[in-house]
Image (cartoon, rainbow, N blue to C red):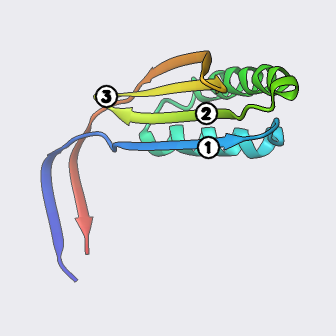
Amino acid sequence: MFAVESPDVAAREFSFAISMSGQPPQDMLGDLVSGLLGHAGCSDDVVPGVVEAVQGAMGAAARTNLASGSLCSVRLSARGGEVQIEVRSGTDLVWQGRQPIPEVVGNDASV
């Protein structure tokens, strides 16, 4: 085993998207969004509010899509020091939000 030290490491970057034909169970969607925001390093005090907003938007998108048969989707992308979140009903944007994420400095990793 050896250690790798990196003085300045950018915040974690990722993109995650899921599409559904209906509204997912609230706990499943909440766990996904909460876990991804936590992974990105978002503050614990903002996560519940973001989760609630995403769940509400997905519920609205699912109700809209019942008639049209379109898919609902949620996308979270972390880059440039923030997490960008979009909820869509088909191709229509239903809700979007952004959460700042702190920079990770002085990272030590053991391999």
Amino acid at circle 1: Ile
Front residue (pair 63, 52): 63
Residue 76 appears at what percent x and percent y?
A: 50, 35
SS for dot 1: strand
Q: CA distance from mark 1 to mark 3?
A: 22 Å
Instruction: Say which residue appears at 39% left-offset and 35% top-offset.
Output: 78
Residue 103 appears at what percent x and percent y?
A: 28, 34
Amino acid at circle 3: Gly
SS for dot 3: loop
Q: CA distance from mark 2 to mark 1?
A: 6 Å
The correct choice, above or below, for 14 with respect to 42 in the image is below
Reading the image, the residue beneath label 2 is 74
Q: Given contact means CB atoms under 8 Å apart, are the residues at marks 2 and 1 in contact?
A: yes
Label number found at residue 35 = none
Query: In the picture, which quadrant includes the C terminus?
Result: bottom left
Reading the image, the residue beneath label 3 is 81
User: Is 101 placed left or right of 97 in the picture?
Assistant: left
User: Which quarter of the picture shows residue 105?
Assistant: top left
Q: CA distance from mark 2 to mark 3?
A: 20 Å
Instruction: Say which residue appears at 56% left-offset and 32% top-offset.
Output: 44
